[in-house]
Amino acid sequence: MSDKIVVAALYKFVSLPDYQALREPLLNALLEHGVKGTLLLAEEGINGTVSASRAGIDGLLAWLKRDPRLGDVDHKESYCDEQPFYRTKVKLKKEIVTLGVAGVDPNRQVGTYVEPREWNALISDPDVLLIDTRNDYEVAIGTFEGAVDPKTKSFRDFPAYIKAHFDPSRHKKVAMFCTGGIRCEKASSYMLGEGFEEVFHLKGGILKYLEDVPQAQTKWQGDCFVFDNRVTVRHDLSEGDYDQCHACRTPISVDDRQSEYYTPGVSCPHCWDSLSEKTRAGARERQKQIELAKARNRPHPLGYNPRQTNEA
């Protein structure tokens, strides 16, 4: 796979009081090693998904290891044929994954990690409440057997959902999962603070599970949404068949793309009847610029994706 692009999802909750000063040197390291994608820095840690050649990713990881706080950053890899990102960015944030509840700190309190190969046994226990902490458009593509879908539009909706539907006195064992593991660290810390006693979360997230657990033994159903231009990956971590509507950002299937309501880059069956004319006009212009860039063999000029927040 030496000629493949390596996609690395990485994060770590760790105290970084100097996170603002880290931005420029980290950005320079990304550029030096030809790494594209976005990394988020906050006082609570680092998070993001980036891609490069094997040498580029190894160079970035070596640079991170120079800082003792970041040397053991959690990271998972997959591969693709084309560069899935258009830009290189380091952003400063209040939180590396936004829950919006003051005082929730995985550096102080976090749930019990469960290794991927032990996950099936845990979620097969009928006394375990299994919650998918991701957003509705992610859950719609794939999830674990028996998982509860909170139908959240944003991770900020998660605390209200938990308070409305679950009680620590009745739900004694709770297991949670997300794409790469980071969201569950925040969610498990929150739930422990709310009085839930036994809180478990999948170490490394869905991506690590797909990497470690043979498909013949899987309890995963469907594809997994990822925060880059591959949109989804299959159980073998190869690129899935989904695309993404540039107008509403909903993942769209092969069947969706056969619909009379699908216009590449402009609308899809999920949004054709709800877009304002202003949004539709913007989508048409965006698609025009994409097609011009492709015709000229130049990089995509409009890489921004509001869902690519790396809140895995």
Image (cartoon, rainbow, N blue to C red):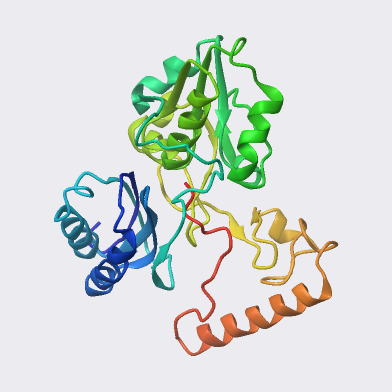
Residue found at the far right of this picture: 273
In the displayed structure, does residue 133 sit left or right of residue 91? Answer: right
Front-most of residues 163 and 212? 163
Image spot of residue 262 (x, y percent): 75, 65
Image spot of residue 159 (x, y percent): 61, 34
Q: Quadrant of residue 29?
A: bottom left
The tally of labels here is 0
Front-most of residues 72 and 85? 72
Image spot of residue 16 (x, y percent): 30, 52
As displayed, is residue 132 above or below residue 196?
Answer: below
Q: Residue at x 37, y 47 (%)?
A: 44
Q: Residue at x 37, y 52 (%)?
A: 43
In the displayed structure, does residue 290 sit left or right of residue 67? Answer: right
Front-most of residues 15 and 6? 15
Image spot of residue 106 (x, y percent): 39, 35
Q: Residue at x 48, y 15 (%)?
A: 197
Q: Quadrant of the N terminus?
A: bottom left
As displayed, is residue 112 above or below residue 107?
Answer: above
Q: Residue at x 26, y 46 (%)?
A: 73
Front-most of residues 201 and 97? 97
In the displayed structure, does residue 200 sit left or right of residue 107? Answer: right
As displayed, is residue 184 above or below residue 141?
Answer: above
